[in-house]
Image (cartoon, rainbow, N blue to C red):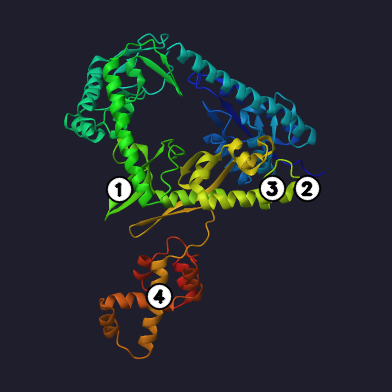
Amino acid sequence: MSPRRKIRCAIYTRKSSEDGLDQDFNSLDAQYEACAAYVASQRHEGWTLLSGRYDDGGLSGGTLERPALQRLLEEIDAGRIDMVVVYKIDRLTRSLADFSKLVDRLEQANCSFVSVTQAFNTSSSMGRLTLNVLLSFAQFEREVTAERIRDKIAASKKKGLWMGGNLPLGYDRHPDPKARTLVVNEEEARTVRHLFGLYDELGCLRKVEERATAEDLRSKRVVRTDGSVKGDCPLSRGQIYYLLRNPVYLGKIRHKDKIWDGQHPAIIDQDIWDRVQEKMRQASNRSRARGDSDARQHSTDPGAWLTGLLYDETGDRLTPTHTTRKGRRLRYYISNRLISGGKDISGWRLPGPALENAVIDVIVRHLQDAAAAHQVLAQPEAGSAEAVQTSVADLVTRLLGHGCQIGAALLAKGKLARGQIDLEFNPKTLASALGIAADHLHPDLTHVTASFDLCRRGVEAKVIAGDMAPQPDPHLRSMLIRAHGWARDLKAGVQLMEIARRESVPDAFIRTRAQLAFLSPKIQTAILDGSQPPELTLKRLVSVTHPLEWSEQERLFGF
């Protein structure tokens, strides 16, 4: 009789809130002990418990971006886990879309999972059916809970209560934690009144910022629970603008587009508020008129249409900015903390047009791939396949022609991380653009993940997102063609110094660049059609001596 196969088990636990996690025996421990007891009861089936723990405390089940879960999935992909044990299925995920991804990933690794309190596992069809039903209720519960929380916040703000968030300069939390209101910080309130007075006097944000810097006016200083300090920095123009537009200083509470009377005292009076708002409106109209004039001169510039839609891996919003160089206006998107907080090596600074084109390219390829795989509709039908393909092709054409308007409408939000970009789309807008009912869309159509990188070529930065179509480097391509001309001259007996004199360049310039003509055919073909590795720049090619062997050249330059 053959020995029973050993089944390696890992336990995954999760708790949505951080309440009670500091206790000696918390909810995660209770889940783990229940699961461990279940594994022990299955010892006769060959189940053995692995030593590592996978605990996610204080994290929602609405996303898969959880550290312990990601570690667990990496171990599963590596083939080191055969069974995942959870206390309840909603500890693993509350999303049907995420569940389908998890099941596919586990099946590829020949791994199953079991819920110890719900008496089923995914190794049988009945178990998978039961799981789908339970997950439907789990997702419904999560969505209803989220709606209830949003409604509670809206109702509380309508009563004038402070519902948390970043404390505005000039106010502190009420010393009574049960009192959801603000109290005036007199020292900071003087700074707020002074800033309103400066704008009332000067009528220009730039001048107010300069005066604030000269007078060493600083942002709110907040001491976190771990002792670190946030804020206490010179006020940026953006921070001053937000402060001057914040109705909290009138004793009001804002919720989305509505403003309610607050229960906290005002710092400024209505007269100066009205004067400042009017002057800001006039300044905005002047800026907009100037911007319209610029737009007429540069009608091909769509503007920073990704504003408010993209975030970096820290959750910081990417903010549009610009600079003028040699009479040219250059646009960028940068992490907001770089504007208000100085230097941060983790912050992003991306060329605006290149980023916008890359996002459009990712959306277009995502739609084309979904259409090719018949994954536009949740339930594809043979009779409607041609109409769906036509709708996708039409939307792709409009994106390529008017990407800024349509892309901004389709995109709900996006996240950038090193090596990856994640985009989520507005289901209703996407469905409307395709002429399809929103509830008929395939669940995977409303989000896409693609590779993302930033490659520097000299002073130029190039954004590379997804499987972008080849784009030849015009400077490198031109130099390769010129190198062949110089090589022909050298073979014909023309002296290198004579070629350099004719081209009005140093001898070393010709010597280092003529060697491009002797690169392997594979490398030269890639340079001509633009499919070379992004890091293969002219600077790199001329800074080293090329090996004579073509295979060595290709290895050296990343082919």
- Foreground tag (4 vs 2): 2
CB-based contact (under 8 Å), mark 4 and mark 3: no
**At which x and y percent is residue 151?**
54, 18
Tell me, yes or no, if residue 155 can be seen here: yes
Residue under circle 1?
A: 323
3D distance between C-alphas at marks 2 and 1 = 53 Å
Q: Gap in Å between the C-alphas at discs 4 and 1?
A: 36 Å
Residue 383: give its label. Answer: 2
Q: Earlier in the sequence, mark 4 or mark 3?
A: 3
Q: Is residue 361 visible?
A: no
Check disc 4 and give the amino acid type. Answer: Leu
Q: Residue at x 64, y 27 (%)?
A: 139
Nearest the viewer among 136 and 30 is 136
| Local secondary structure at mark 4 | helix
The residue closer to the viewer here, 40 or 56, is 56
Q: Is residue 485 above or below residue 370?
A: below
Q: Which residue is mark 4?
A: 516
Give the Cα distance between marks 4 and 3: 48 Å
Q: Specify the amino acid type for callout 3.
A: Val
| Precedes in sequence: disc 2 or disc 1 | 1
Element type at marker 1?
Answer: strand
The structure residue drawn at horizontal position 63% and vertical position 32%, both measured from the top left corner, is 95
The reply to whether dot 4 and dot 2 touch (C-beta < 8 Å) is no
Mark-to-mark CA distance, 2 and 3: 10 Å
Tell me which numbered mark, 4 or 1, is placed earlier along the sequence.
1
Q: Which mark is residue 58?
A: none
Do the residues bearing badges 2 and 1 touch, measured as CB atoms within 8 Å?
A: no
* Helix, strand or loop status at disc 3: helix
Which residue lies most toward the left here?
214
Residue 165 image offset from top left, x and y in percent = 41, 22
The mark nearer the N terminus, 4 or 2, is: 2
